[in-house]
Image: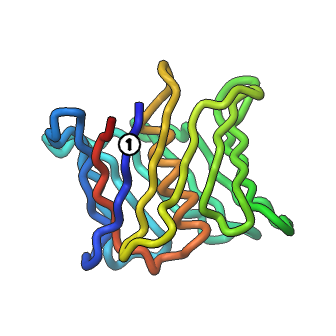
Amino acid sequence: MRYVLKQKLLSLASDFVIRDADARDVFFVKGRVFSLGAKLSFQDMQGNEIVFIKQRLLAWRPTYEIYHGGALIATVRKALLTFFGSRFSIELPGPYGLEVTGNFLAHEYTFRYGGDVVAQVSKQWFAWTDTYGVDIADGQNDVLLLACAVVIDLACHGRKKSGFNIQLGG
């Protein structure tokens, strides 16, 4: 499945929608404007929360927690020392976690689970707003991987981001 994440040029909060192949809104992601640390809520179009992202403030490195139904399902951490690339580890329940590696300008990422590529993120370089393509392998948790892509963008670029408009592409 391929998604396109496009930052809104002007937005007070980190609010955006996720659209399906028929350009129908299927998810809404709502950011909190005045909060300590980044907080985002992935919701269905009826306003029911599916996934919640919260930045852990007291951590040595950028750390974000992803919750589903109040239970912690993933912890995303940026590696402390990387000289020519970006690297993230995503702790998941079970024997493996996700490993995410990217190029030295933090514009290309590959998600691996147990050595297998499960998603790739690529940034369009010369656009007025940041535009990312996210290719997710069949059978994966799309919402979790999209949430992780947003977290990595937050960790690399801080809260200067205003939001994304996510659309499914072909």
Residue 101 image position (x, y, % from top left): 72, 50
Decide which of 169, 89 is in the foreground and name it. 169
Q: For the N terminus, which image quadrant?
A: top left
Decide which of 48, 71 is in the foreground and name it. 48
Residue 93 image position (x, y, % from top left): 65, 29
Residue 65 image position (x, y, % from top left): 56, 52
Q: Relative to residue 34, is residue 98 drawn left or right?
A: right
**Where is residue 61, by image quadrant?**
bottom right
Residue at (64, 60) in percent of width and height: 63
Q: Amino acid at mark 1?
A: Tyr
Judged from the image, the secondary structure of the residue bearing numbered disc 1 is strand
Decide which of 21, 47 is in the foreground and name it. 21
Residue 59 image position (x, y, % from top left): 71, 67
Q: Please, which residue is most extreme toward the top here?
A: 139
Q: For the C terminus, which image quadrant?
A: top left
Graded by Cα atoms within 10 Å as few (under 14), some (14 to 19) or many (20 or more), the crowding at tag 1 reads many
According to the picture, the residue beneath numbered tag 1 turns out to be: 3
Q: Relative to residue 11, is residue 57 drawn left or right?
A: right
Q: Please, which residue is most extreme toward the front here?
A: 126
Placement of 5 over or under 118, stated as above or below: below
Decide which of 5, 67 is in the foreground and name it. 5
Scheme by which the image is coloured: rainbow
